[in-house]
Amino acid sequence: MNDKNKIIAGLIIFFVVLLFPFWFNLIFGAADAATAPEPELTDKAKQAETCVAETDYMRTEHMQILDQWRDMVTRDGKRIYKAENGKEYEASLSNTCMDCHSNKEKFCDSCHNYTSVDPYCWDCHTYPEETE
Amino acid sequence: MENSRRRFLKTAGFSILGVGAGSMLIGLAPGPSEAAGPAAETKPVFVDRPDAKHARRWGMVIDTRGLDARTCRKMEEACHSIHNVPDHIGKFGNKNHEIKWIWDTEFKHAFPGQEAEFLSDRLENAPVPVLCNHCDNPPCVRACPTRATFKREKDGIVLMDFHRCIGCRFCMAACPFGARSFNFRDPRPAIEDENPEFPTRMKGVVEKCNFCAERLAVGKMPACVEASGGALTFGDLNDPDSDIRKLLADEYAIRRKPNLGTFPSVFYIV
Ligand code: SF4
Ligand code: SF4
Ligand code: SF4
């Protein structure tokens, strides 16, 4: 039982390796950590002032809204969405959302890339620049 | 030694019991994820457009007497261009990957088992446009494991939710009319002019005629009907006063493969 030193040294090495992601990020990560993206609004979107819901809500829940829209339009054929702000919108990704937010790269992609999500909307739906 | 092992096992046993019971209690408590968000508080409201067309059961009558090959081309062109149907034959000369929503065939292929021995010359050569029959008893819907293909209760249209289609092609095996096509490859390169108002499909999904559900929803008639110069009549089969029912009352009309019991909603005057 005289291996105390070896054990302690082993333990230290073990924890250094275990915590690698943390200290690596602390030392080297901070410098080039990606800054949170600022999705850019088109002029049209700025003029409209409100989206179909509050900005904060849209930021976190737009996928839920799109899901609802999809089901209502494809299953029930109901195409008009009455928003809480009293306005009516056509429930369509390509024709309503992308009409204002026609800058997919600077709007949609900026956050999606940052959060590393890869939605497959555009496998089928078109966006303005693409069809031009 | 004996004693301490015994004590260790006891403590371990009790801890596991405690952790188990604790997590059960936590599980019983209402989770934060179930707490109502803004979407759950007020149910979102969706409505039809005021100009939408409604019916209990949409149907079509095709009068082959008023059709020639050129009109058939026009109908096909109208349908395929607004629905972004890829043209793999025209673009790549690849017959195996052909996608079609409406096309024309010969009488003997459209109505196998109903051909007469001495068919009139006109019928022998006339093009017969065929498309999904929007069957009242659709076998494709029964075959679909994901409910990507479904019959819309309100108007009888057999529709597809492309988001949901997994490409298993059970529906294609089930459909006795060959009305469905499978995207073996990315359709986009084979689309000449994309219509931005309608989605394309992606590789690995099935597609077919949708009775222009997206046009009916905005008050328009199906594209092929508009392009047919009056040879196609579209309307509500459940409404005895509709044009289509009046036409059916006057003329003798047949359906494709009636013995299979799928009850097509597309009728042919031959
Ligand atoms: S024609 Fe085929 S695809 Fe269309 S509803 Fe009937 S079975 Fe389904
Ligand atoms: S291919 Fe798609 S639509 Fe056809 S049965 Fe499979 S999931 Fe349903
Ligand atoms: S009803 Fe519409 S989708 Fe069907 S064949 Fe005619 S144009 Fe195409």
Image (cartoon, rainbow, N blue to C red):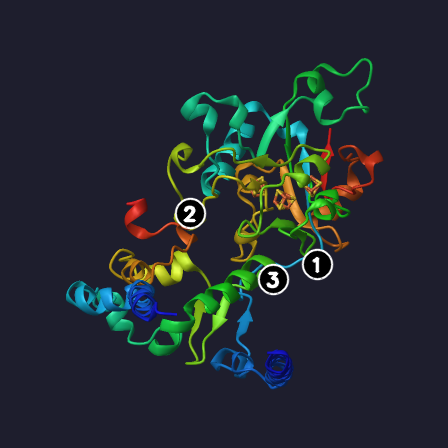
Query: Which residue, given by chain and number where applicable, does mark 2 sit on?
Result: A123
Mark 2 residue type: Asp
Q: In this image, B112 relative to B88: left or right?
A: right
Q: Residues within 10 Å of mark 3 (few under 14, many from 20)?
A: some
Q: Is residue B29 visible?
A: yes
Callout 2 secondary element = helix
Marks 2 and 1 share the same chain? no
**Alpha carbon separation for disc pair 2 and 1:** 29 Å
Instruction: State which quarter of the image contains the N terminus of chain B.
Output: bottom right
Mark 2 — on which chain does it sit? A
Question: In terms of sequence position, does the residue under pointer 2 or pointer 3 come before the other?
Answer: 3
Which label is found at residue A76? 3
Q: Work out whether residue B147 or residue A93 is closer to the camera in this orientation and state it.
A: B147
Mark 3 — on which chain does it sit? A
Number of marks present in the image shown:
3
Q: Quadrant of ligand 1?
A: top right
Mark 1 — on which chain does it sit? B
Q: Quadrant of residue A41?
A: bottom left
